[in-house]
Amino acid sequence: MLRKIDQQVCIGCGVCATVCPGDVIEVDDTSKKAQIKYPQDCWTCFNCEMACPVHAVDVHPFRKVKPMAW
């Protein structure tokens, strides 16, 4: 499964890193953008994707519909 954060869209708010239960995402100090630190450790919980205010996080790029909060 491909996980990515669109660096062009990311505003560096850090919400995705805050809601990640696996501590997989971090905000880079130099670029002020979020990046996936350990993609192989992602739990695929979609918390980051649902929490991103600008929809820069894409946990599963082949899915046509964004997950709804459960």
Image: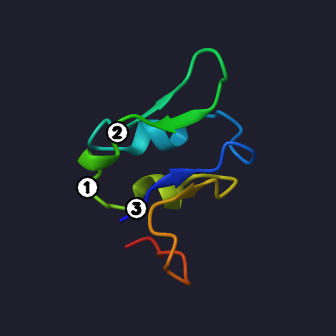
Quadrant showing the N terminus: bottom left
How far apart are labels 1 and 3 at the CA level?
A: 8 Å
Left or right: 40, with 33 as reference point: left
First of labels 2, 3 by sequence position: 2
Q: Do the residues labelled 2 and 1 touch (CB within 8 Å)?
A: yes
Q: Please provide percent x and percent y for residue 60.
A: 45, 68
The one nearer the camera, 68 or 26, is: 26
Q: How is the image coloured?
A: rainbow
Q: Which residue is at a point 55% across and 23% down the rendered structure image?
A: 28
How far apart are labels 2 and 1 at the CA level?
A: 9 Å
Q: Mark 3 points at which residue?
A: 46
Q: Are marks 2 and 3 in contact (CB under 8 Å)?
A: no
Q: Name the residue under label 1.
A: 43
- Disc 1 marks which amino acid? Trp
Q: Mark 2 points at which residue?
A: 24
Q: Please provide percent x and percent y for residue 44.
A: 31, 61
Tell me if residue 45 comes above or below residue 22 in the rendering: below
Q: Please provide percent x and percent y for residue 65.
A: 55, 82
- Total count of labels: 3
**Dot 1, how many residues are within 10 Å of its Cα: few (below 14), some (14-19), or many (20+)?**
few
